[in-house]
Image (cartoon, grey):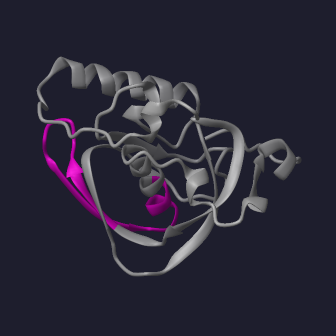
Amino acid sequence: MGDPLLLNVAAPVHDFKSQGLRDLIEDMQDTMHALNGAGLAAPQIGVSLRVVIFGVEKTPRYPNAEEVPYTILINPKLTFLDEEMEEGWEGCLSVPGMRGLVPRFKKLRYQGYDLNHNPIDRAVSDFHARVVQHECDHLDGVLYPMRIEDLSNFGFSEVLFPDSDLQDD
């Protein structure tokens, strides 16, 4: 947090066949797995392109979360399916050591492309929808603390959850 790149709108990907795009995604995968993240956006590793990856298996960081299939999503477009929102605790690899209670749309449709330029079109809800919104926010220069409505619900993970195994996202 504080890096000006994280506050910019990322550029769309035009060349799906470039080695640079493949290298970027490999770097993102390595970074996300090394840090046990639920997802990662290209701007988080210094590349201003509209690329996110995400996926969650059973993990101590999200013990009650449903699994989210591993996805490479390029040039995403989100459509909210209704107005229902839900608050949930989030953290971020770009805001290490902190968590906040963030309102997100409960149901959405996301569209975009995979690495081979095949279309992706999914309707999702709950934790899956939250992860997608969080990562796609990075592509528009939005960090989760900007969405917190009550800053008394924002703080250091070890203070908010002293007996938990929660780590940074």
Q: Residue 169: percent from the left, percent from the top?
A: 61, 41
Measured from the top left, where is residue 72 in percent x and y? 31, 41
Note whether 120 is above or below 8 in the view shown. below
Residue 10 in the image, given as x and y percentages of width and height: 31, 39
Q: Locate residue 83: give its quadrant.
A: bottom left
Q: Tell me if residue 153 is in the magenta stretch.
A: no
On the picture, is 165 further left or further right than 102?
A: right
Q: Would residue 131 be found to the left or right of residue 60 on screen?
A: left
Location of residue 113 with respect to 109 vertically, above or below: above
Locate residue 35: give its quadrant.
top right
Considering depth in this image, is 60 or 152 the residue closer to the camera? Answer: 152
Residue located farthest toward the bottom when viewing the structure as drawn? 83
Confirm whether residue 161 shows in the render.
Answer: no
The magenta span reads 109-131
Quarter of the view holding residue 108? bottom left
**Number of numbered discs on residues:** 0
Give the residue displayed 14% in from the left and 22% down from the top.
18
* Percent x, y of residue 95: 63, 38
Residue at the image position 57 percent from the left and 35 percent from the top = 94
Compared across the picture, whether 34 is left or right of 151 comes to: left
| Residue occupying the far front of the picture | 4
Residue displayed at 43% across by 51% down:
137
Q: Nearer the viewer, residue 94 or 55?
A: 94
Quadrant into which the N terminus falls: top right
Residue 19 seen anywhere in this rendered image of the structure? yes
Residue at 22%, 51% in the rendered image? 112
